[in-house]
């Protein structure tokens, strides 16, 4: 029976390419127009950039938006502009990309890992207050995979303890929480336009906010410490050149026209796939119902129970699913705090207090997700017809039948 599996030479369940990014001559012509104009830079030739920033702010329902070189820098600008000082603590989840933690270190602050909710894989609001100390200054909730965090609870905790909230919405382009776009709820929201993201130009980032003072500070930090109304060679803050180019924005200005429709498509397909996979023993879609009104499904995540697959390991299961034609990945293999960076405290010149010891951190839900449960289907696989979702479910059932025979 195992011979029927594609990994063993059998026929693939789904035989098509899931291409990303999606583009046509419109993007090519937009970039060509910028090249021909000779106005490539920013801020000296930034009309196109300002126009896109205004469009993105309007799309998200905020007053301000600020482009920068990538999502990591977007987070860094927001955190530093919030006024953190060396030794301050910032609460983050351990199930996220490394940048959510390294930007905290770069600000000479201490990442404090709080475990995730077993249903959503987002920061668990029920565990936040126990991690707050007199040194805590901010919370960075990550809308992981495009699933909205429980922002009402997080914002209430932040207000109670006078903490800043910086939304990591790098997976959340176009997604919503109770009708509000992700990134627009906290003090600032940060996005990535890296090549895998739902809105992309290869690299790039964006910060949104409704706070004028915060926006002005982030703008200064992005633009080598210059300030509004100041001179070209007049630098007030420790900023750097984190500006985006017009060539990148030319692509984004075209790509954003498709974002709303693509987000709705991912949401519909994800909801439908939930209904299919919830019927398969050993496969449990992540929970919904914390307030997300639109899920961007940058990643579709389900929980895998190997006991229903003859104890087939998660990595082997993921390999089989890829061979069947599903754009799949086994997910993060370990929590952030298990990275050598944290285990060995390879923080170089950063002023992390001696009392910090990440070898003692234990977040059981995150560890279970990394080692045993979480399997990802990537976002570009969620843009096809419903028949693709049927095939994804069919591939899982095919593997289960083959390994259990």
Image (spheres, rainbow, N blue to C red):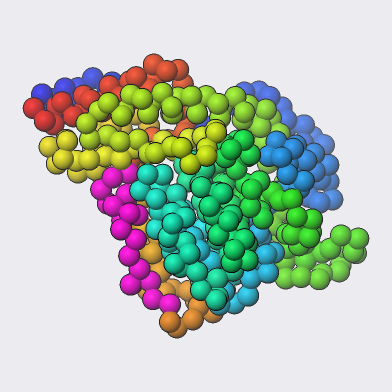
Residue 149 in the image: above or below residue 378? below
Residue 234 as seen in the image, left or right of residue 200: right
Q: Quadrant of the N terminus?
A: top left
Residue positioned 32% across, 44% down in the render = 374
Q: Is residue 304 visible?
A: yes
Q: Position of residue 65 (x, y in %)?
A: 73, 47
Residue 367 included in the magenta stretch of the image: yes
In this orientation, which residue lies closer to the viewer: 338 or 296? 296
Q: Is residue 202 visible?
A: no
Q: Quadrant of the C terminus?
A: top left
In this orientation, which residue lies closer to the viewer: 337 or 201? 337
Residue 249 as seen in the image, left or right of residue 317: right
Residue positioned 72% across, 71% down in the render = 238
Span shown in magenta? 356-374
* Residue farthest bottom in this picture: 354
Q: Quadrant of residue 382?
A: top left
Residue 71 in the image: above or below residue 5? below
Residue positioned 59% across, 66% down in the render = 161
Residue 151 in the image: above or below residue 60? below
Q: Position of residue 66 (x, y in %)?
A: 73, 50
Q: Position of residue 381 (x, y in %)?
A: 43, 28
Residue 221 as seen in the image, left or right of residue 203: right
- Tell how many labels: 0
Residue positioned 48% across, 41% down in the render = 290
Residue 111 included in the magenta stretch of the image: no
Q: Position of residue 325 (x, y in %)?
A: 32, 26
Q: Main SS of the magenta segment?
A: helix
Residue 209 as seen in the image, left or right of residue 89: right
């Amino acid at each position: 029976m195992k011979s029927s599996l594609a990994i063993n030479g059998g026929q693939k369940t789904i035989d098509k390419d899931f291409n990303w990014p999606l583009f046509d001559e419109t993007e090519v012509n937009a970039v060509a127009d910028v090249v021909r104009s000779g106005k490539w830079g920013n801020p000296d030739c930034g009309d196109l950039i300002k126009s896109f920033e205004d469009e993105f702010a309007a799309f998200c329902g905020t007053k301000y938006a600020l482009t920068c070189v990538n999502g990591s820098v977007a987070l860094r600008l927001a955190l530093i502009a919030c006024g953190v000082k060396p030794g301050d603590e910032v609460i983050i989840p351990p199930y996220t990309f490394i940048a959510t933690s390294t930007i905290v270190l770069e600000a000479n602050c201490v990442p404090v890992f709080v475990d995730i909710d077993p249903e959503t894989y987002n920061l668990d609001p029920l565990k936040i207050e126990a991690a707050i100390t007199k040194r805590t200054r901010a919370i960075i909730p990550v809308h992981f995979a495009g699933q909205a965090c429980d922002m009402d609870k997080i914002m209430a905790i932040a207000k109670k303890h006078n903490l800043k909230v910086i939304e990591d919405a790098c997976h959340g382009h176009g997604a919503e929480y109770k009708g509000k776009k992700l990134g627009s709820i906290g003090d600032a929201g940060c996005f990535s336009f890296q090549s895998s993201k739902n809105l992309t130009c290869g690299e790039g980032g964006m910060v949104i906010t409704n706070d004028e003072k915060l926006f002005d500070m982030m703008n200064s930090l992005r633009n080598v410490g210059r300030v509004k109304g100041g001179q070209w060679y007049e630098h007030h803050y420790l900023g750097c050149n984190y500006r985006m180019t017009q060539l990148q924005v030319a692509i984004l200005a075209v790509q954003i026209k498709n974002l709303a429709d693509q987000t709705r498509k991912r949401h519909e397909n994800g909801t439908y796939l939930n209904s299919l996979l919830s019927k398969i023993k050993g496969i449990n879609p992540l929970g919904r119902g914390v307030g997300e009104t639109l899920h961007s499904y940058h990643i579709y995540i389900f929980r895998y129970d190997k006991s229903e697959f003859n104890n087939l390991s998660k990595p082997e299961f993921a390999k089989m699913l890829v061979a069947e034609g599903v754009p799949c990945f086994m997910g993060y293999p370990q929590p952030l705090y298990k990275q050598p960076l944290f285990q060995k405290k390879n923080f170089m010149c950063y002023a992390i207090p001696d009392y910090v010891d990440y070898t003692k951190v234990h977040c059981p839900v995150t560890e279970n997700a990394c080692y045993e449960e979480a399997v990802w289907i990537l976002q570009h696989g969620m843009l096809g017809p419903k028949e693709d979702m049927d095939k994804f479910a069919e591939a899982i059932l095919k593997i289960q039948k083959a390994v259990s025979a």
